[in-house]
Image: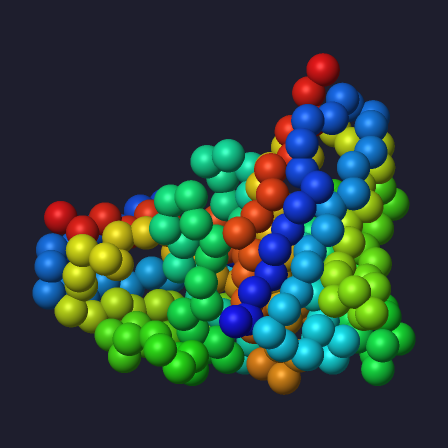
Amino acid sequence: EVQLVESGGGLVQPGGSLKLSCAASGFTFSGSAMHWVRQASGKGLEWVGRIRSKANSYATAYAASVKGRFTISRDDSKNTAYLQMNSLKTEDTAVYYCTRHRIEDRAFDIWGQGTMVTVSS
Amino acid sequence: QSALTQPASVSGSPGQSITISCTGTSSDVGGYNYVSWYQQHPGKAPKLMIYEVSNRPSGVSNRFSGSKSGNTASLTISGLQAEDEADYYCSSYTSSSLYVFGTGTKVTVL
């Protein structure tokens, strides 16, 4: 079964750090670009960033709102992508989804169930 | 990168057709045929409904169709059904090699 499962969400204080994981199964993870998308409660989807495959030098890119604070990485041996979040702000509170990206048509075709991150004192 | 503009809500009766617009700029929607649409039911993950402006993934009903004119893309749902009630988001590749989503549209089946 094709699947993405996020984990690692929770409550963290402003200024703190958290690392999310996204475990993939059922498809060739190593050849796929992986993206992170977040959604604040009652709000729309916001693209966070991406990491490309080894063939594309594991290149990363980030939205302006998280650049310099968030880092995306991957471990192809574990079929897992990560989102390291530092210097967290209250406005980072959201459900975080990982999603597989198809480079040929720029579509996000597989989504995880999401993990909730709450930044609050 | 500003979010693409969608109407906050669209409604229709069962069997009717509705259209959701998604307006961007020449740096995103207007510049590339990489517009996709996602359906999201409450508490669920988004689901890909349309990619490359007008292509439907396997398993998606042919009642869903997409198009684009200039800087505006559109999603049309024909033969509206109760199960279509959900939030819909467009997304586009951008000239910065990044991605942007639309503001989202709540579809209500009357």
User: Residue A44 at x, y = what percent?
Assistant: 50, 45
Residue found at x 13% / y 48%: B110
Give the residue at the far top of this rendering: A121
Question: Which image quadrant for residue B31?
Answer: bottom right
On the picture, is A86 further left or further right than A28? Answer: right
In this rendering, the answer to whether A1 lies above or below A115 is: below
- Could you say which is closer to the camera, residue B20 or residue A38? A38
Residue found at x 17% / y 61%: B81
On the picture, is A36 further left or further right than A107? Answer: right
Residue found at x 10% / y 65%: B15
Question: Which image quadrant for residue A27?
Answer: bottom right
User: Residue B53 at x, y = what percent?
Assistant: 46, 77
Colour basis? rainbow
User: Residue A24 at x, y = what percent?
Assistant: 66, 65
In this rendering, the answer to whether B8 lies above or below B15 is: above
- Could you say which is closer to the camera, residue B19 or residue A105? A105
Residue A46 visible to the viewer: no
- Could you say which is closer to the camera, residue A85 or residue A66? A85
- Could you say which is closer to the camera, residue B8 or residue A112? A112
